[in-house]
Amino acid sequence: MPVSYKDLGLSNTREMFRRAFEGHYAVPAYNFNNMEQLQAIVTACVETRSPVILQVSSGARKYANQTLLRYMAEGAVKLAREIEKAHGAHQESPITLHLDHGDTFDLAKSCIDHGFSSVMIDGSHLPYEENIKLTKQVVEYARPRDVSVEGELGVLAGIEDKVMAEKSTYTRPEEVVDFVGRTGVDSLAISIGTSHGAYKFKPEQCTRDERGVLVPPPLRFDILREVEKKLPGFPIVLHGASSVIQEAVATINKYGGAMKDAIGVPEEQLREAAKSAVCKINIDTDGRMVMTATVRKVFVETPAEFDPRKYLGPARTALIEMYKRKNREVLGSAGRYGKEF
Ligand code: G3H
Ligand code: 13P
Ligand code: ZN
């Protein structure tokens, strides 16, 4: 029996994006694979009074199990409402459950039938007409169910789930009106120089500052501005938007890791993007790295420890802090549904 996201207390992205567009901020889309990540994301976003998109890749869905995920999402909404009640909040902050980089119609359909309120269908690697056909097929299934659909034009370098793109292809602004019009998508992911993972830029693409830290090439804001002009008022999505926090890189390396020249998108550029038509910013790698840095530190400093709560607990605490800071200082999504708790 298919379940509707409405019965789980989830929201689609329509109203969220309308408010984000008008308020000049971006909704955080944080990926999760396990309980501690989910608890951290929900706690941080509810406590900062931010909307949130809980993002699940097909790999994460397999890892967590699709049935368990549906109940985890329902539990996350209940947790959010409990936190709000405990603080006497007058309004609820919206929560979306979103499929990240869906690559087939069947996967998107299955997620919709399991309670997702939003899906991405990523046909960006396909020839243009095939991307349109696949995306349109998903929109036709999603629309009567009031589920949001995100499409993508342009290819990001790095790993997009199973697909590894060696080189990025920037979005061509001259295609966006036709694509959005013919597919009926609710939002569009574009490629303006971000990329997935912890190694977004090769050292030869960068310069180095006085400390020897890599400085990446700037995002192509000119392309974003062109897209904004062509699609007035339309929500744009940025993937590959982790800043690859250098403190986390240093901690990982200090405690036995090996992440040389890991580099992300500078936060000032994300802050600028969040004020524009970019209504959704995707962050996964930063969460993975903060979690890993914390766990590595606990292992090295307390080698006799073997209770998972003693390393996953501190990792969860560190994640909450990181997500709160992103909401406040980078995306501008904090305080949008009442005063912070
Ligand atoms: O865009 C990719 C996301 O970071 C998800 O990664 O497929 O390894 O879960 P994953
Ligand atoms: P990062 O690898 O930069 O966190 O990007 C995540 C993402 O785009 C998920 O779709
Ligand atoms: Zn992505």
Image: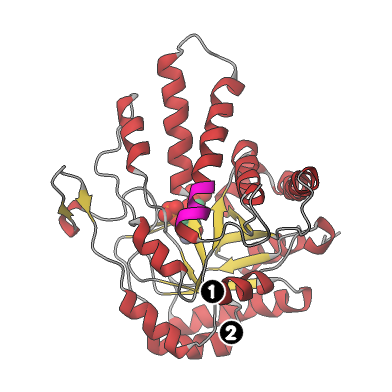
- The residue singled out by tag 2 in the image is 183
Q: Earlier in the sequence, mark 2 or mark 1?
A: 1
The magenta stretch spans which residues?
324-329
**In the image, residue 100 above or below residue 273:** above
Name the residue furthest left.
Answer: 210
Residue at the image point whose x is 30% and y is 30% from the top: 253
**In the image, residue 1 above or below residue 319:** below
Q: Secondary structure at mark 2?
A: helix
The amino acid pointed to by label 2 is Thr
On screen, residue 328 versus residue 41, left or right, reads left
At label 1, counting other C-alpha atoms closer than 10 Å, the crowd grade (few under 14, some 14-19, many 20 or more) is many
At label 2, counting other C-alpha atoms closer than 10 Å, the crowd grade (few under 14, some 14-19, many 20 or more) is many
Q: Quadrant of the N terminus?
A: bottom right
- The residue singled out by tag 1 in the image is 151
- The majority secondary structure of the magenta stretch comes to helix
The tag on residue 184 is none
**In the image, residue 212 above or below residue 56:** above
Q: Is residue 161 visible?
A: no
Say whether marks 2 and 1 touch (CB < 8 Å): yes
Residue 316 at what x, y percent from top left?
57, 34
Q: To which quarter of the image does residue 23 belong?
A: bottom right
* 324 or 206, nearer to the observer: 324
The amino acid pointed to by label 1 is Gly
